[in-house]
Image (cartoon, rainbow, N blue to C red):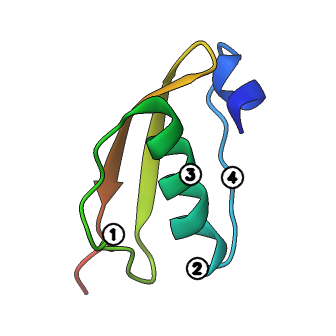
Amino acid sequence: IRKLGESLSTTAICSQGDVIPDLLQRLAALDHVDLPNPLPLKKGSFCVLIFDGPRLFSVEYVPPPKI
């Protein structure tokens, strides 16, 4: 994930719901980025991870569309 964050292009990564919270919490803890607790990860939502080189700079949560 960090290697992808270093690139100058936009990258989309998909995974199952069980993996995403653990991944986000580990990256955020290592780089001292605050996350909401609990993470509001609903089906259809996504997170935008912003990197400064290999360092996670921020995480923006985008909720699922309202139908």
Position of residue 49 relative to residue 64, above or below, is above
Residue drawn at x 67%, y 17% as measured from the top left: 6
**Separation of residues labelled 2 and 3 (CA atoms):** 15 Å
Residue that numbered label 4 is attached to: 13
Residue that numbered label 1 is attached to: 39
Residue drawn at x 24%, y 60% as measured from the top left: 36
**Separation of residues labelled 2 and 1 (CA atoms):** 11 Å
* 66 on left or right of 6: left
Instruction: Point out the residue furthest to the right here.
Output: 3
Residue 38 image point, x, y percent: 28, 74
Disc 1 + disc 4, Cβ < 8 Å: no
SS assignment at label 4 = loop
Location of residue 39 by image quarter: bottom left
Please name the amino acid that badge 4 sits on.
Ile
* 48 on left or right of 30: left
**Separation of residues labelled 1 and 3 (CA atoms):** 13 Å
Residue that numbered label 2 is attached to: 17
Residue 1 image point, x, y percent: 71, 39
- Counting the numbered discs, the total is 4
Residue 11 image point, x, y percent: 67, 37
Q: Which mark is residue 26?
A: 3
Disc 4 + disc 2, Cβ < 8 Å: no
Residue 42 image point, x, y percent: 38, 81
**Separation of residues labelled 4 and 3 (CA atoms):** 16 Å
Please name the amino acid that badge 1 sits on.
Leu
SS assignment at label 1 = loop
